[in-house]
Image (spheres, rainbow, N blue to C red):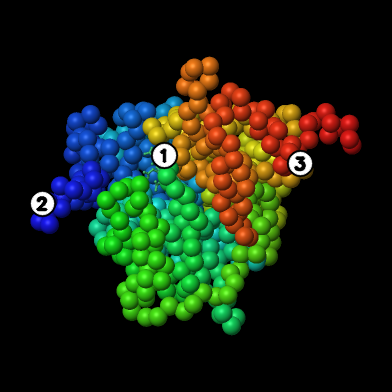
Amino acid sequence: MTEAAKKETLNKFEKFKAEKDGLAVKDELEHFAAISWEAIDETDRDHRLKWVGLFFRPVTPGKFMMRMRIPNGVVTSHQMRVLGEVVQRYGDDGNADITTRQNIQLRGIRIEDFPDIFSRFRAAGLTSVQSGMDNVRNITGDPVAGLDADELFDTRELVCQVQDMITNNGEGNPEFTNLPRKFNIAITGGRDNSVHAEINDLAFIPGFKNDTFGFNVIVGGFFSAKRCDAAVPLNAWIPPEDVVAVCRVVLEIFRDSGLRANRQKSRLMWLIDEWGIEKFRTEVEKKLGKELQPAAEKDEIDWEKRDHVGVFRQKQAGLNYVGLHIPVGRLYAQDMFEIARLAEVYGDSEIRLTVEQNLIIPNIPDSRLDAFLAEPLLQRFSISPETLTRGLVSCTGAQFCNFALIETKNRALGMIKALESELHFTRPVRIHWTGCPNSCGQPQVADIGLMGTKVRKNGKAVEGVDIYMGGKVGKDAHLGTCVTKGIPCEDLQPVLRDLLIEHFAAQPKQEAISAR
Ligand code: SRM
Ligand code: SF4
């Protein structure tokens, strides 16, 4: 087939990527700022700008979303303040979300301000490059890396090295800007799989061989509207110093051989299906230039998953990390400034983010702990939220996302509060909301997952959910499945109430009181 004929058969995304690399827009930011968002070429505006982390929002035209990269979820107080200042510019339109990939997204961004924002971020050591479309997403690592006395490996440095390789130190790297589809990487060095390794395209989990530490490699995990799969073992155990190289060769294989014809079938798992895991492993070995050792017999994920909300002693004597619950991950400028201040006054200026959309302030000395816990911000961002609130995760939903079939964050908060007012809980329950089958809110990892859908009620299309159950995280993680379809949101509360009573030992408050 001639090159021209080949191009003809490409789908629309492959075509525009072949015509002009997404990262090229990095050199056009001043021009875009000058001409305003309405005048930008549509493909640049709606798609290519995502290569610099800027997402056009059809729901709020002209007010862009900006997705950062926060490797391992580690952010300094200075960076948090710089992020907060950007959000503050936009008044009521400005806010930020902690995402399910331990990352931050900002809202309200105007294209005319973007060149300035982009250079401010660079000066603060922040980058947003390659954070959307057919790129590698934020790389997740243990949120308590370097703090946890029981960790097996501190993932921070490695996660940064992988990000630097992929993004050319945050400047953008054309080697990896035209993947067949998005790609997720996670590295965990703790015992509780704090990063949901199994739902990543490529993940590294701790395993020992003869007392030597290394990582077992798993591949192909992903969620999409049509198919969801947990990652499968590559049957490889590698030393930490090979992680960057393995990421590189897996990405090269995905880039050069990944399926591109149908976007519904382009994630890494589809290539593994086509080749078989043995051939895939052989290709990794060939490109790596050495044989892979078989996987360690067992991995070291032997703890239940922690959510890190509360006060915990660090491995460093006399220091504590405190996990604050951020309801559905939503932050406003003043919150961000206040969090930065608390990290500086009580800790060592560092802040950590978690995949549960919460944050941690580490390195608080024993002597400062009581004063920290008395800070007014902790009334809103609690260290001991109620049971359902504590385990609540929600994707963006209809407020800003044009794929959404339902409103999520506000509805989720309201419904959880209502359930907490009528039920008493004796065990944690993790409820995840996601506004459509893309599954950004990961309903498949939840005790109860709620996926937005449209339902017919009294002859009218109304907002509804499909209910997922059985997601297990941490030790023996496995995905939950859909158990009930099409519950209108307005009828959902009693359905959840019954599920909580039947499966999670919740008790109606009156009964719980009289039983005491
Ligand atoms: Fe996602 C697309 C938000 C984590 C699967 N995701 C989108 C877009 C960009 C769609 C859009 O353009 O509107 C959403 C932006 C909405 C907005 O304005 O915020 C969006 N995804 C999110 C976030 C913000 C949800 C959250 O509230 O935390 C998460 C950002 C993570 C980050 O920091 O990079 C987010 N998305 C996920 C996850 C969870 C994860 O990675 O653990 C998944 C499932 C895992 C996976 O990808 O395998 C996920 N998002 C998708 C998909 C389905 C991918 C597929 O292969 O089909 C899409 C749609 C697509 O890519 O075509 C999507
Ligand atoms: Fe948007 Fe759907 Fe992702 Fe929610 S799950 S953020 S509604 S794409």
Which circle marks residue 106 in the picture? 1
**Residue at 43% in and 43% down:** 225
Helix, strand or loop under label 2 = helix
Residue 450 located left or right of residue 184 = right
| Eye-nearest disc, 1 or 2 | 2
| Eye-nearest disc, 2 or 3 | 2
Residue tagged 2: 4
Question: Quadrant of residue 490 in the image?
Answer: top right
| Sequence-earlier tag: 1 or 2 | 2
**Residue at 61% in and 64% down:** 301
Which circle marks residue 505 in the picture? 3
Return the x and y of residue 191 as percentages of the image width and height.
62, 64
Label 2: few (<14), some or many (≥20) within 10 Å? few
> Quick one: quadrant of the C terminus?
top right
Helix, strand or loop under label 3 = loop
> Quick one: quadrant of the N terminus?
bottom left
Residue nearer the viewer, 341 or 275: 275
Say whether mark 3 is within 8 Å of ligand 1.
no
* C-alpha gap between disc 2 and disc 3: 63 Å
Helix, strand or loop under label 1 = strand
Looking at numbered disc 2 in the image, what kind of residue is underneath it? Ala
| Sequence-earlier tag: 3 or 1 | 1
Looking at numbered disc 3 in the image, what kind of residue is underneath it? Ala
Label 1: few (<14), some or many (≥20) within 10 Å? many
* C-alpha gap between disc 1 and disc 2: 40 Å
- As displayed, is residue 249 above or below residue 405? below
| Disc 2 to disc 3: CB gap under 8 Å | no
Looking at numbered disc 1 in the image, what kind of residue is underneath it? Leu
**Residue at 15% in and 50% down:** 7
